[in-house]
Amino acid sequence: MARALANPPAAGWHYSNTGHVLLDMIIERVTGRHWWDAVRRRIVGPLGLTGTSWPGDSPAIPGPHARAYQPFEAGPPIDVTEQIIPDPGSAIISTTQDLNTFFRTLFSGRLLPPAQLAEMTRTVPVAPELAALLPGARYGLGIFQRPLPCGGTYWSHPGGWGGYLTDNGVTADGRRSVVLSVSSVLGTGPDDYVRQQHAADALVEGALCAAGG
């Protein structure tokens, strides 16, 4: 709180993982329980997301999983599968099947009341520095709205950490969705991230457009 604001409230947008940490603290203060307990009781359990877990401070991944590879400044890619991620939201482990179930349930209106889903999907333009990575994207509460090359828009929240990259997309009615998991990062520079993200987007958007046709 001692630091200056990036911009006045409602006058701009910037992505910050600090917001997820603060959200976890608010959940714990309001419920009196650990944030993961609230997520498990409200989302993971009711939706039957049996492949979704939170490892805490363990570097191990339960069950069958892809290994992750990360290139550094020089040399071949390094196996970085076992790692401890400090950001609680990024540390959740899941499967492509569970993520499809989550996105379809959310956008079919079966997870949140209509007013809350409407607030979540009220968007603003993303910051210019993110526009190169996600062209045409707008951001709501934890979700991006993105244009489809075949017309219309879809909802998504791509991301990655330590060798893993996940891309996804779901239609506004929750009827069609696709989740892509990649277990190797192409490089360490900004151009590498943009190139890999655009390749992943092409697969997701192509699948959504084909399903819609």
Image (cartoon, rainbow, N blue to C red):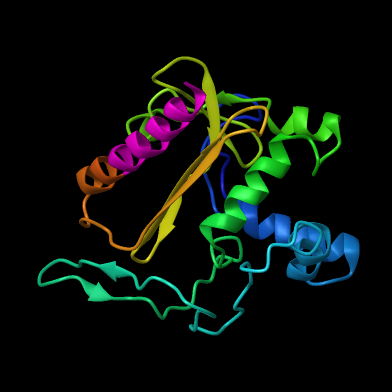
Q: Is residue 202 left or right of residue 78?
A: right
Instruction: For residue 2, say whether it is visible.
Output: no
Q: Residue furthest top?
A: 151
The structure residue drawn at horizontal position 73% and vertical position 35%, both measured from the top left corner, is 108
Work out whether residue 109 or residue 191 is closer to the camera in this orientation and state it: 109
Which of these two is toward me, 16 or 161?
161
Residue 70 lies left or right of residue 146; in this view the side is left
Residue in view at x 33 percent, y 65 percent? 163
Instruction: Give the side of residue 209 with respect to residue 86, left or right.
Output: left
Left or right of 83 on screen, residue 119: right
Would you say residue 120 sits in the magenta stretch? no
- Give the tally of numbered discs: 0
Q: Residue at x 35, y 38 (%)?
A: 203
Furthest toward the left, the residue is 75
Q: Main secondary structure of the magenta part?
A: helix
Residue 41 place in picture, x, y as percent: 83, 64
Q: Quadrant of residue 129?
A: top left
Frontmost residue, 60 versus 103: 103
Find residue 36 and report its image quarter.
bottom right
Residue 137 in percent (x, y) is at 47, 27
Q: Is residue 80 above or below residue 30?
A: below
The answer to whether one can see residue 47 in this image is: yes
Q: Which residues are magenta?
A: 197-213
User: Which residue reaches farthest right?
Assistant: 31
Q: Pinpoint residue 68: horizontal percent, then vertical percent.
A: 34, 70
Residue 82 percent across, percent down from the top left: 41, 81
Q: Is residue 199 on the magenta stretch?
A: yes
What residue is drawn where x is 85% and y is 29%? 115
